[in-house]
Image (cartoon, grey):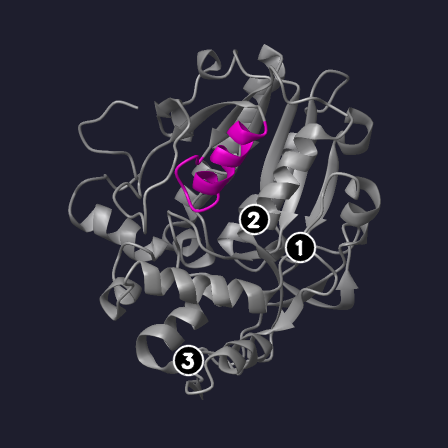
């Protein structure tokens, strides 16, 4: 097992939904953490959190070798982070999520970074009729976000050598409370509808399948790939989740209603039958990294956590519908207010 003491980890997207939870955990595990973020979501926190001591304010497209040459490992989270944002400008999605990621991996290999853990997504499976799909199954990305992830995986894998170990974590759809919260994730979203309106609004027909994972468990997966022996993770791809955590959207609504029986489930149908549907097999991560990765959450526990946090933080309907916790609305606000240019670089700031 790789020991954490002395290992320095660069986390890109350190002040995002996952990064703001992961970085404090890494520090508590004994890792030295260097955070890097362009801070698109500064001021959008639900509550305050512990930041890594070393923070770099930088766009990943502008990273140079000097930024990473003191690091032993990189966890690359930074991306335009969901399908609606990815569709806003497909070329930008490719430049940020793919082109910049590949260049970062190239630099990492050249300066001697040992491990490069890439945050990918199960959304690359897109539409799957294969039953439960594992890492060897056919990918079928139907969105710009998903396409950027699989292309990055394929290109970065080519840099693997005896000194450089890329790892690809195909994450399930995440849920749970983060200081940099998001309500554009399905469990968080449906719970938000219930809490702020008394209705659980489903925009599709509720039949699509999604694999789900709690934020705490996804952090455990990243930490596991830092700690596991190199021979277990070298140039490997892992679906990240649990086999009993594939749900239809309507199942999530039923779970929320079980906890909040006064809420009505409302099918709006405005998105029709969502074409993306996939059930994922997670046997590989359980079999290979089972000594290091122990996911423990289920959605009922997660929904209760979310509801409690909404109550404690006085989360309002205005919060739920505003631009702080929805990534697409926040990016559009930055553009419309001329804080960033058409290429999503901060105006008047050299990153």
Disc assigned to residue 316: none
Distance of mark 1 from mark 2, alpha carbons?
Answer: 9 Å
- Range of magenta residues: 13-29
- Callout 2: helix, strand or loop? helix
Tell me what residue is drawn at x 41 percent, y 85 percent: 263
Residue 117 sits in quarter: top right
Circle 2 sits on which residue?
216
Picture coordinates of residue 146 (x, y %)?
56, 52
Q: Residues within 10 Å of mark 1 (few under 14, many from 20)?
A: few
- Whether residue 14 appears in magenta in the rendering, the answer is yes
- Callout 1: helix, strand or loop? loop
Q: Number of labelled discs?
A: 3
In this picture, residue 5 sits left or right of residue 43: right
- Callout 3: helix, strand or loop? strand
Circle 3 sits on which residue?
201
- Whether residue 147 appears in magenta in the rendering, the answer is no
Q: Please say whether residue 144 is visible from this viewpoint.
A: yes
Q: Are marks 1 and 2 in contact (CB under 8 Å)?
A: yes
* Mark 3 or mark 1: whose residue is earlier in sequence: 3
Circle 1 sits on which residue?
296
Picture coordinates of residue 77 (x, y %)?
51, 38
Q: Nearer the viewer, residue 321 or 135?
A: 321
* Mark 1 or mark 2: whose residue is earlier in sequence: 2
Numbered disc in front, either 3 or 1: 1
Viewport quadrant of the N terminus: top right
Establish if 45 lies above or below 346. below
């Amino acid at each position: 097992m790789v020991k954490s003491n002395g290992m320095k980890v660069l986390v890109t997207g350190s002040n995002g939904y996952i990064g703001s939870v992961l970085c404090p955990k890494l520090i508590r595990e004994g890792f030295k953490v260097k955070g890097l973020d362009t801070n698109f979501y500064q001021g959008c926190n639900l509550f305050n959190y512990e930041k890594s001591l070393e923070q770099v304010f930088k766009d990943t497209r502008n990273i140079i070798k000097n930024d990473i040459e003191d690091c032993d490992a990189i966890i690359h989270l930074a991306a335009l982070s969901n399908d609606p944002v990815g569709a806003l400008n497909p070329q930008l999605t490719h430049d940020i999520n793919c082109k910049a990621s590949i260049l970062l991996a190239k630099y990492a290999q050249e300066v001697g970074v040992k491990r490069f853990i890439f945050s990918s997504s199960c959304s690359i499976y897109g539409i799957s009729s294969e039953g439960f799909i594992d890492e060897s199954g056919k990918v079928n990305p139907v969105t710009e976000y998903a396409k950027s992830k699989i292309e990055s995986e394929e290109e970065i894998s080519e840099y693997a050598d005896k000194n450089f170990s890329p790892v690809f974590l195909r994450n399930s759809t995440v849920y749970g409370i983060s200081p940099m919260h998001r309500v554009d994730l399905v469990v968080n979203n449906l719970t938000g509808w219930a809490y702020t309106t008394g209705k659980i609004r489903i925009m599709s027909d509720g039949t699509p399948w999604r694999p789900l994972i709690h934020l705490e468990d996804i952090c455990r997966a990243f930490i596991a790939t830092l700690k596991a022996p190199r021979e277990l993770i070298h140039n490997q791809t892992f679906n990240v989740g649990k086999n009993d955590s594939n749900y239809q959207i309507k199942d999530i609504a039923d779970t929320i209603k079980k906890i909040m029986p006064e809420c009505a489930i409302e099918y709006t149908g405005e998105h029709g039958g969502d074409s993306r549907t996939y059930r994922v097999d997670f046997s590989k991560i359980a079999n290979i990294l089972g000594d290091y990765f122990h996911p423990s959450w289920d959605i009922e526990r997660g929904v209760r956590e979310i509801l409690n946090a909404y109550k404690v933080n006085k989360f309002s309907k205005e919060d739920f519908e505003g631009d702080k916790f929805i990534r697409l609305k926040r990016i559009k606000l930055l553009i419309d207010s001329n804080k960033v240019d058409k290429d999503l670089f901060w105006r008047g700031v050299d990153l």
